[in-house]
Image (cartoon, rainbow, N blue to C red):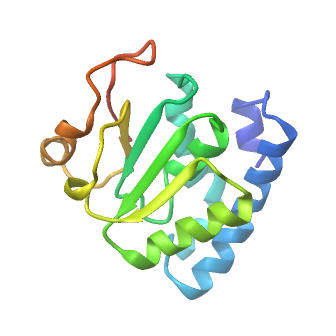
Amino acid sequence: MKEILHYFPNLSQEQVQQFERLKDLYEEWNQQINVISRKDTENFYERHVLHSLGIAKIIRFQKASEILDVGTGGGFPGIPMAIMFPDVQFTLVDSIGKKIKVVNEVCAALGLKNVTGLHLRAEDVKGNFDFVISRAVTQMPIFINYVRNKIKKERNNKLKNGILYL
């Protein structure tokens, strides 16, 4: 947790509490479903949360921006980003239903109202978004084909709408 506070010292008390609870929630779920690699639990904040928050170092999403997280798995980068940007709407999708169950349960436990978890493939998602985010889903050219028609043309943020791929 100290890693997050080092890079993001201006978090609200609620955000700090949500980030603090995150590791315990994932450890509980990891006992039932393999959400993240068991060897990564010791480095959870560095390898999963902080890595996901790298996006927050390059852009501050405007209120009411809509973000699609494709291939979210257990909720990365979407859930840490949703904690960081509570006024932004996040849609997290994955083709594996049990992982979306974890996403929805973790979000409910944290009180995140700005996240919708959907058991869908990227190409089946309806609507358009300001940004599409993802983390190591597939090769970039393949990923672009999945999501190129999901990006809004009108701009809501300083950075041009598009793909943010970790």
| Image coordinates for residue 152, horizontal then vertical, percent | 29, 28
Position of residue 75 in the picture relative to residue 126 (left or right): right
113 shown above or below 37: above
| Image coordinates for residue 141, horizontal then vertical, percent | 13, 42
Name the foreground residue: 46 vs 17. 17
14 shown above or below 93: above
Position of residue 67 in the picture relative to residue 20 (left or right): left
Name the foreground residue: 24 vs 47. 24
Name the foreground residue: 46 vs 81. 81
User: Which residue lies most toward the bottom here?
Assistant: 32
140 shown above or below 45: above
Q: Residue at x 56, y 30 (%)?
A: 56
User: Which residue lies most toward the front here?
Assistant: 127
Q: Please say whether residue 126 is visible from this viewpoint.
A: yes
Q: If the image is split into quadrants, where does the C terminus sit?
A: top left
Position of residue 38 in the picture relative to residue 26 (left or right): left
Q: Residue at x 79, y 55 (%)?
A: 20
User: Which residue lies most toward the right here?
Assistant: 13
| Image coordinates for residue 49, horizontal then vertical, percent | 60, 50
**Total count of labels:** 0
| Image coordinates for residue 81, horizontal then vertical, percent | 57, 42
130 shown above or below 48: above
Q: Residue at x 28, y 54 (%)?
A: 125
Residue 158: quadrant of the picture: top left
Residue 149: quadrant of the picture: top left
Q: Residue at x 66, y 44 (%)?
A: 83
